Amino acid sequence: MTTALEPDDLVPAAPRVGVLGAGYRTATLGIVMVVTLLAFEAMAVGTVMPVVADDLDGLSLYAWGFSATLITSVLSTVLAGGWVDRSGPSRPLMVGLVTFVGGLAAAGLAPTMWLFVLGRAVQGLGMGVAMVATYVLIARVYPDELRSRVFAALSAAWVVPSLIGPAVGGAVAEHAGWRWVFLGLIPLVVPSALLLVPVLRGLTSVDAAPASGKARHVAAVTVSAGAGVLLYGLGELGWVLVPAAAIGLAGLAFGLPRLLPAGALRLRRGLPSVVVARGLLAGAFFGTDVFIPLALTSLRGFSATEAGVVLTVGGLGWSAASQIQGRSERSREFFVLLGAVLVTTGIVGAMVALQVSGWAAAPAWIIGGAGMGFANSSLSVLTLGLSPEGEQGVNSSALQIADTLGSSVVVGLAGAFVTGSGSGRLGTGLAVAGALLAAVAALGVIAALRLRPAGVPRPEAAP
């Protein structure tokens, strides 16, 4: 027996529009191109820093070539949150990119190491503002169902520079001079940013929640200074470590509760745990990523190229998992928990493998990279989904702060264990650092179990 069709049954389903479909193509290409260039600079600078320090006679300021960018990016990330919420992402994004370009020019033309460090600090200011504005731009332009795909594309925008950035940066420094690693990016950033102009003009303003600007600004300065002093102490060790650690931790303890969602340091359910999970997983993963090459070259006799292959497969695992989560209809909470478990498994597997055979670390690090691919983009989507429209900038800045501080502080702490062990007991130091990194990842698993706000039921499984 046939059933009569209702009128709605005769209407064909609307085709699914992707991030490169009509209406989104320009925004997607502009965002991905801008983030790729920001990522390339971040990945390439590590390769050319020894050349820069030698050329400018600035070995004593070597670490500040990295730390200056970190400190100013934390500061600008905080300041950008309220600004983006009040004015929308258009002006902050363009100001951030112009500032970043100014920093590239200052670093590339610097006649002394002090001025080079100043240029790097300006780059950090611009990058912090640009990244917060980009997150809010994604929230304002794309519907919920496309955000995971956009963040998957952003993950790919970081993976490609991580694969080729160091090699290209080294080649440019060798054949054209290190200054062109910075100056050569300027003509590439400008046309990429111009792609976003039509998209930014079409945005409408929203009512932002009142921001306690002065309190956040003071907290931002305190956290930035505290992070700088703490990292300095961890790098110096000796008698400097104790007072530097005390001052740095005091600054973080004062400022972070005012910059992160309420209850973050207590792992309160919902957005606070989302932000903390991002910081813990970033710290655990990137901390391991830093020390794997050291273990391979120092303990297993790998060449730098062979060690790079192991890191590359981790990046490929990240990219593949990010694409999978972006196309899946499973909950974001599922992918964060899966990712946290895989990151923890990958770290433990890599550290055990390094005691046996260097190449055995490669499959373990594919697992670790896949964990970040599943978790990272999903945490970004959850942050925007749990944020009222007028608070997306502030909460995106909190996510970036957790990401940056988690990576830098955990890397610094693990590095202190490795450095303190001395060259004669490097294996012991790396083992202790590995245990610390695995413990941080395990805390990330705990945070991943607390992502859903209290009282919010889990979605029913699709029939």
Image (cartoon, rainbow, N blue to C red):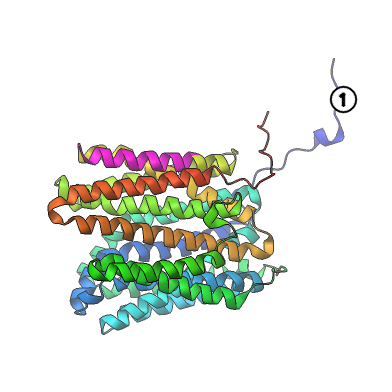
Determine crowd level at label 1: few under 14, some 14-19, many 20+ residues with C-alpha closer than 10 A: few
Where residue 232 sits, quadrant-wise, is bottom left
Any part of residue 12 in sight: yes
Where residue 258 sits, quadrant-wise, is bottom right
SS category of the residue bearing label 1: loop
Q: Is residue 438 left or right of residue 215?
A: left
In the displayed orientation, state which residue is furthest to the top. Answer: 1
Residue 366 percent across, percent down from the top left: 35, 41
Q: Which residue is mark 1?
A: 4
Q: Is residue 396 left or right of residue 354?
A: right
- Three-letter code for the amino acid on which mark 1 is drawn: Ala
Q: Nearer the viewer, residue 44 or 440?
A: 440
Quadrant in the picture for the C terminus: top right
Q: Is residue 359 magenta?
A: no
Vertical arrangement, residue 430 with respect to residue 189, above or below: above
Q: How many marks?
A: 1
Q: Nearer the viewer, residue 338 or 190?
A: 338
Q: Is residue 343 magenta?
A: yes
In the displayed orientation, state which residue is furthest to the bottom. Answer: 111
Give me the residue at 46% from left, 47% from top: 444
Q: Is residue 242 left or right of residue 97?
A: left
Q: Which residues are magenta?
A: 338-356
In the displayed orientation, state which residue is furthest to the left. Answer: 424
Residue 291 percent across, percent down from the top left: 27, 52
Residue 198 percent across, percent down from the top left: 61, 69
Any part of residue 190 in sight: no
Vertical arrangement, residue 214 with respect to residue 381, above or below: below
Residue 382 percent across, percent down from the top left: 59, 51
Q: Is residue 206 left or right of residue 348?
A: right
Quadrant in the picture for the N terminus: top right
